[in-house]
């Protein structure tokens, strides 16, 4: 048997509700004074680190994942067929789940959603935009990068002026979108506003598979179609923390580590390959 | 208890309002607007008066009759239609009972069945030919007879419609009169019944006619903005939103002909600034005709918005999802307006033999389309579980696929086999590895027949290309690049 709360108890309850509301109003006002948004998918989400879902890919990125509000350049070190965009899309799989999904700016009108789906990109959460080259393309990319509802953007940028690049960087800093730029190898010598620059080269060296062309036997048939890449981080965004736990100013530093990856074409999983530095001759006397 | 007794106990704590049905009918008239989203034929009870004095229960101002003949397919079927109607009202906090049947009498009776039988208030659909089966199970109130007749039937031990129907018609007529017999026929749908439908809402149109032709773009743009303000204001006054504006421009450049286009939205809106912004973006890729003599804009796809109260402090997941959906809708609208609907698309995969037709690109902005938020990939879903192109692994189809394959020059090849060296974009490529052939061909009965042997080749630089040889001619093409 339950009793209705007394008038006194109702009064206490109301007072507590009013106090809680007043506290929330004060918090919102404090946030506004600091120029931040109220909790939600605003300021707290904008600089968040997103794990790609692949331990291998996360190990490549300087911060161990994709940082919201940044641009990443994927430079095709081996030419258009080198597979740099494949690797970028494998990293972008996590962005499909974020916010409103992935937007692909396909001004060349060659994007194949069937192949993207085979890499794990959900077509229902992918928007393909096909502007014309030139001013229309620049406007489109900036509009998409500015929109907070977008999870990630993939854009092919063969030629990119520094002013436009800078506008894109400011756009993602404001919106928290992750921008993936697929660029040609020659862009490595151009100035960049990207936080992370990766040079992806199809790995044609090493003992895996019969890579050497044998002119007497012609092209070699090989089991499996898995691909192998050598990835070098040309620039990485690195956050430092002092011993006091306060976050210091971000600084850019160059990284020269190169890693080898292999994509298993049956499982779709990426594997990190060990790099052989040099072989050490075995001491016969020790072998006993 | 009587009103006097209640007043004696509670004194000023209660307010007594006489029920004359007018306020209820006024509220119903407002809801007619919502019902017009489903059908243009909506009727409401006409007679007014206190509920206790109405002789026909169907005159109570609590029901809407919506003739949905031919409308079901717009909602994916009759069940989809009633479900959408149920959602439209329950989202606004109403408790609503919906029944769909072949006649107004049966629909009215079945919709009230939940009240009489204490059943859940889910929408009900009476299958064709099952009207009498439904009615027989209902109490006599389902016949919409005067209260005195209902009481008399119950005194005689007739509590459900089935037992009433077992009586001879002559006997019913003798005891209760011709009117009762007529009402029973109406309730069972045996008598043709015509309802008085309310006139549909007036179309919203704004236009300007010019005494002298105008060619200056600045003036035309300003006039266009005024027209948008005008229709937005009328939408606001009618408390409606729209999905599409239809433009019609007449000019002396092409007398007798008019230029027409549409401004489409992803989410309905009535905000003048938003509509004007989209129209301006759209005009960046359009050209005004010379010597314009008239401009007209009409509103299409009007609907009544479902009011959603935004929360100031609590940012729950569903609120965030709605914000994201709204943001994406605005982005799609802006991009579609500036670039054209065909430039903002969503891929739809399908089983197709011809690789260039294996995916269809659908414009996200089209009349009547509702872009739903699809379910997201879960953390534990593996890559293989979501491999849409079930036949293809990640290495079998190129990311770069030309809509029209490029003819290439094969410098060296194995007889009947893969190419050894080919030229593409002024570069010579030497093949180190190859996979294939994968034979893709259509049946002889198809209009667009293809017979292709595809090879995936990897050059000595590590680049991969998708080439094919057309079997009928033996020439080679590059169809894709494994970027």
Image: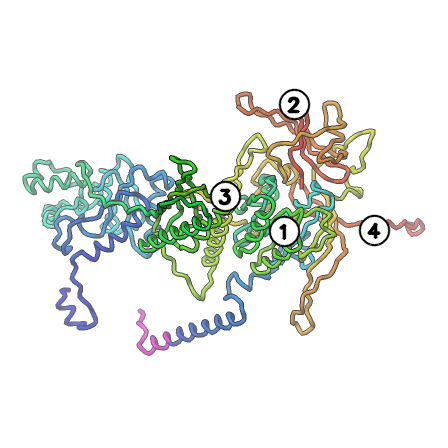
Is residue B301 visible in the rendered image? The answer is: no
Q: Which residue is mark 1?
A: A180
Q: The numbered mark 1 sits on a residue in which chain?
A: A
Q: Residue at x 61, y 57 (%)?
A: A167
Marks 2/3: CA–CA distance: 39 Å
Q: Report the residue marked by disc 2.
A: B471
| Residue A7 within the segment the image draws in magenta | yes
Q: Secondary structure at mark 3?
A: loop
Q: Nearer the viewer, mark 2 or mark 4?
A: 2
Confirm whether circles 4 and 3 share one chain: no
Q: Which residue is mark 3?
A: B340
Q: Residues within 10 Å of mark 4 (few under 14, many from 20)?
A: few
The single residue placed furthest to the left in the displayed view is B174
* Of B333 and B247, the residue lying toward us: B247
Q: Position of residue A225 (x, y in %)?
A: 70, 38
Tell me if label 4 and label 3 are in contact, CB under 8 Å.
no
Q: Residue at x 76, y 28 (%)?
A: B411
Mark-to-mark CA distance, 2 and 1 = 40 Å
């Amino acid at each position: 048997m339950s009793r209705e709360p007394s008038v006194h108890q109702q009064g206490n309850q109301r007072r507590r509700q009013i106090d809680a509301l007043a506290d929330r109003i004060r918090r919102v006002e404090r946030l506004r004074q600091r120029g931040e948004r109220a909790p939600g998918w605003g300021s707290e989400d904008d600089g968040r680190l997103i794990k790609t879902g692949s331990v291998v890919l996360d190990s490549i990125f300087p911060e161990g994942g994709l940082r919201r509000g940044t641009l990443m350049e994927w430079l095709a070190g081996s030419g258009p067929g080198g597979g740099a965009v494949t690797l970028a899309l494998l990293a972008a799989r996590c962005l499909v789940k974020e916010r409103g999904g992935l937007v692909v700016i396909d001004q060349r009108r060659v994007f194949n959603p069937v192949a993207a789906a085979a890499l794990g990109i959900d077509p229902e959460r992918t928007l393909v935009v096909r502007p014309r080259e030139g001013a229309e393309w620049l406007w489109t990319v900036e509009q998409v990068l500015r929109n907070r509802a977008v999870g990630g953007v993939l854009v092919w940028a063969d030629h990119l002026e520094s002013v436009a690049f800078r506008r894109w960087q400011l756009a993602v800093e404001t919106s928290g979108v992750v921008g993936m730029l697929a660029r040609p190898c020659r862009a490595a010598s151009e100035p960049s506003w990207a936080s992370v620059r990766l040079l992806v080269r199809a790995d044609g060296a090493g003992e895996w598979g019969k890579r050497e062309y044998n002119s007497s036997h012609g092209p070699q048939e090989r089991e499996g179609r898995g691909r192998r890449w050598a990835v070098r981080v040309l620039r990485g965004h690195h956050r430092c923390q002092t011993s006091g736990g306060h976050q210091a100013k971000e600084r850019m530093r160059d990284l020269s580590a190169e890693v080898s990856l292999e994509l298993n074409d049956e499982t779709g999983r990426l594997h990190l390959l060990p790099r052989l530095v040099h072989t050490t001759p075995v001491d016969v006397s020790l072998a006993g | 208890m009587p009103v006097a007794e209640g007043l004696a106990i509670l004194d000023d704590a209660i307010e007594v309002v006489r029920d004359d049905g007018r306020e209820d009918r006024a509220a119903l008239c407002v809801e007619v607007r919502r019902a017009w989203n489903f059908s243009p034929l909506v009727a409401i009870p006409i007679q007014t008066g206190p509920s206790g004095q109405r002789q026909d229960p169907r005159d109570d101002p609590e029901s809407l009759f919506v003739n949905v003949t031919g409308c079901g397919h717009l909602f994916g079927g009759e069940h989809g239609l009633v479900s959408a109607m149920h959602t439209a009202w329950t989202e606004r906090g109403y408790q609503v009972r919906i029944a769909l049947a072949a006649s107004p009498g049966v629909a009215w009776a079945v919709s009230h069945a939940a009240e009489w039988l204490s059943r859940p208030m889910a929408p009900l659909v009476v299958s064709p030919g099952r009207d009498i089966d439904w009615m027989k199970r209902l109490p006599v109130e389902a016949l919409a007879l005067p209260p005195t007749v209902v009481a008399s039937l119950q005194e005689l031990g007739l509590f459900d419609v089935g037992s009433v129907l077992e009586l001879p018609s002559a006997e019913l007529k003798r005891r209760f009169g011709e009117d009762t017999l007529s009402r029973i026929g109406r309730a069972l749908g045996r008598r043709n019944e015509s309802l008085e439908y309310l006139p549909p809402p007036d179309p919203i149109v704004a236009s300007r006619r010019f005494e002298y032709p105008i060619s200056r773009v600045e003036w035309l743009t300003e006039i266009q903005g005024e027209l948008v303000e005008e229709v937005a204001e009328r939408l606001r006054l009618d408390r409606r939103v729209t999905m599409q504006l239809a433009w019609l421009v007449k000019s002396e450049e092409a007398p007798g002909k008019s230029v027409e286009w549409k401004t489409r939205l992803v989410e309905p809106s009535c905000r003048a600034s938003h509509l004007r912004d989209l129209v301006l973006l759209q005009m960046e890729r359009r050209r005004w005709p010379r010597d314009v003599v008239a401009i007209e804009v009409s509103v299409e796809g009007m609907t009544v918005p479902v009011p959603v109260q935004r929360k100031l402090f609590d940012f729950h997941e569903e609120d965030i999802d709605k914000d994201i959906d709204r943001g994406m809708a605005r982005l799609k609208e802006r991009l579609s307006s500036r670039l054209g609907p065909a430039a903002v698309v969503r891929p739809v995969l399908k089983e197709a033999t011809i690789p260039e037709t294996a995916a269809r690109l659908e414009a996200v902005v089209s009349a009547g389309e509702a872009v739903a938020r699809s379910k997201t990939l879960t953390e534990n879903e593996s890559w293989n579980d979501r491999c849409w192109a079930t036949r293809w692994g990640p290495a079998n189809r190129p990311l770069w696929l030309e809509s029209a394959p490029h003819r290439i020059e094969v410098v060296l090849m194995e007889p009947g086999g893969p190419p050894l060296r080919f030229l593409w974009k002024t570069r010579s490529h030497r093949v180190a590895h190859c996979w294939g052939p994968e034979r893709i061909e259509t049946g002889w009965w198809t209009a667009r027949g293809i017979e292709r042997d595809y090879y995936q080749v990897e050059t000595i630089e590590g680049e991969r290309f998708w080439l094919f040889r057309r079997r009928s001619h033996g020439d080679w093409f590059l169809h894709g690049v494994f970027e």
